[in-house]
Amino acid sequence: MRTTFRTASLAVAAVAVTGAVALTAPGMAKGLFDAQNAHKVDGLHANQLTKTQYFKSSTVFDDFDTCAMTDVRTAKFKTTHAGVISVTSSVSAARDTDDPNEGILTTRILLDGKVISQESSANLENDGTEDATVVGIGAGKAGRGTHTIKVQAQECGPGMAFIHHESLVAEYSPFGGAPAGTAPRPVTAKLNR
């Protein structure tokens, strides 16, 4: 009796496991297939979805006393499709020692000749040190191709600036670049079946 019960229990367990595997195999196989073919989102390959690039220079602008926006860093940035480019910039400066007065350094960011940021300013009070880093943040719509990003600065205070480091980080996304008043379309994944 005991042997019959054990044999029957093992048989029932084996049938249950086999049935469970048989029922879940198509779903598991589909999941593996989807994972292998999930390299496209909304028709774009993974290397077309985002791009981030860092640009830096240590060009020295001594006796910078220009009360008009002047290019201090220019970069070329290429996109694969229309979308949005967001930019973060920094300009490090000190009060120039040739003038005892404080300087006021203001920066902004341009994308293809259009201003995409608010102006950011810093008061330069110390001399000979990194007095301040002016940080700017902006974003703008961009089509496919190569774009020009410029960081501009001006000094309109009673003193002068000594600019010694300029950098920017540009980030691209093909999503979110719909024309004004257009509802964004949902992102879909395309499977190769």
Image: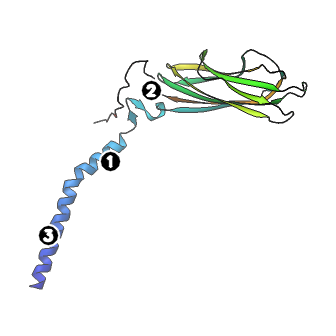
Q: Position of residue 149 (x, y in %)?
A: 62, 21
Q: Secondary structure at mark 3?
A: helix
The residue under label 3 is which amino acid type? Val
Residue found 17% across the figure and 69% down from its top: 13
- Circle 2 residue: 176
Can the viewer see residue 98? yes
What residue sits right under mark 3 in the picture?
12
* Mark 2 or 3, nearer chain start: 3
Residue under circle 1? 32
Tell me the distance, in whole angstroms, between the alpha carbons under discs 2 and 1: 30 Å
Q: Residues within 10 Å of mark 2 (few under 14, many from 20)?
A: some
CA distance separating discs 3 and 1:
29 Å
| Image position of 53 (left or right of 34) | right
Gap between marks 2 and 3 measured at Cα: 56 Å
Asked whether the residues under the numbered discs 2 and 3 touch, taking CB atoms below 8 Å apart as contact, a structural biologist would say no
Which image quarter: residue 102? top right
Residue at image location 46% in from the left, 32% down from the top: 49
Name which residue lies at 36% across and 44% down.
35
Say which element carries label 2. loop
Q: Are marks 3 and 1 in contact (CB under 8 Å)?
A: no
Give the amino acid type for the residue marked by disc 1 in the picture. Leu
Mark 1 crowdedness (10 Å alpha carbons): few <14, some 14-19, many ≥20: few
Report x, y in % for residue 192.
31, 35
Along the viewing direction, whichever of 170 and 179 lies nearer the viewer: 179
Counting residues from the start of the chain, the first of labels 3 and 1 encountered is: 3
